[in-house]
Amino acid sequence: MTELISGRLDRISPLVARIIAPNPGVMTGPGTNTYLIGQRLLAVVDPGPANEQHLEAILGAVPAGAQIKWIIATHTHFDHSPGAALLAERCEAEIIGPQANEEYYEDASFLPDQHIEHDVVLDTGECSIRAIHTPGHVGNHYCFLVEEEGVLLTGDHIMSGSTVVIIPPSGDMKDYIHSLELLKNYDIKMIAPGHGAQDPDPFTLIQGIIDHRLKRERKVIEGMQQLCATTLDELTPLVYGDVDIAMHPIAQLSLLAHLIKLEKELVVSKQDETWRIR
Ligand SMILES: [Zn+2]
């Protein structure tokens, strides 16, 4: 496996190359993966943060005679989309992607020229890039499939080496699991995540994530059965005992997403800040 080094262009398939942004961290792993698709007419997926050094690296990776025609965002989190406007100024590319949600952590500066829709295909003349709506992490999340090669750019829907945080209210655990199941319908040969290394065994990875989420959900139900009535703060250490305590505030977002799913399924109920098993 290629080492994950920021700023360097790594080719991961004949049509797809990756540059890692210099924003490593707890939530971003080695940094955001920016992908360049194509050889002459390029699409850039997830330009990353508004970081001059990273923009220079992207522009420096464009081969002589080639040009960036499209800038695409998987979703509007600050580690994925803010580079779009700056990059577009320098290459006159069209910006494609979802509108930001009016929520916390969303990049309202991302203003797409073209809104994205599920199963719409961008024909670049060199390849077909299919948009797949994958709500879950947040409601406005899309994956992009380079159909000729079966390379799926997953943004924050699937990360390598860490668990995706589900962020209510637009993030939704039921949607998340449904969106993972949805991917089984497509001809995918490689997962190229928004953070971390690519994975050559997509369906094992996808099933593993579904199984992990359902196992966590069983722990939520067991915890609720034990406590009968509880708050998020009380339930978190019981359900995430295996997770570093420093990550518990983040894990609590996913726990809330599990509870909202179970509330919709009439397994638990909520009154004020207290959750009860039904
Ligand atoms: Zn995100």
Image (tube, rainbow, N blue to C red):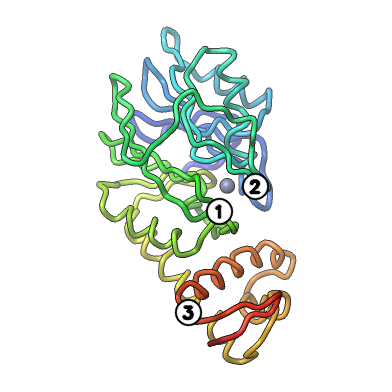
C-alpha separation, residue under disc 2 versus residue under disc 3 = 27 Å
**Circle number at residue 266:** 3
**Circle nearer the N terminus (2, 1):** 2
Residue 117 occupies quadrant: top left
Q: Secondary structure at mark 3?
A: loop
Picture disc at residue 170: 1
Which amino acid type is shown beneath numbered disc 3? Leu
Q: Residues within 10 Å of mark 2 (few under 14, many from 20)?
A: few
**x and y percentages locating residue 100 in the rendered image:** 58, 39
At a point 72% along the width and 80% down the height, the residue shown is: 234
Q: Earlier in the sequence, mark 2 or mark 3?
A: 2
Pick the front one: 268 or 83: 268
Q: What amino acid is at disc 2?
A: Glu
| Mark 2, residue position | 103
Where in the figure is residue 171, as x and y percent of width and height? Answer: 54, 56
- Front in this rendered view, residue 149 or 110: 110
Residue 216: in sight, yes or no?
Answer: no
Q: Is residue 241 left or right of residue 16?
A: right
Local SS, label 2: loop
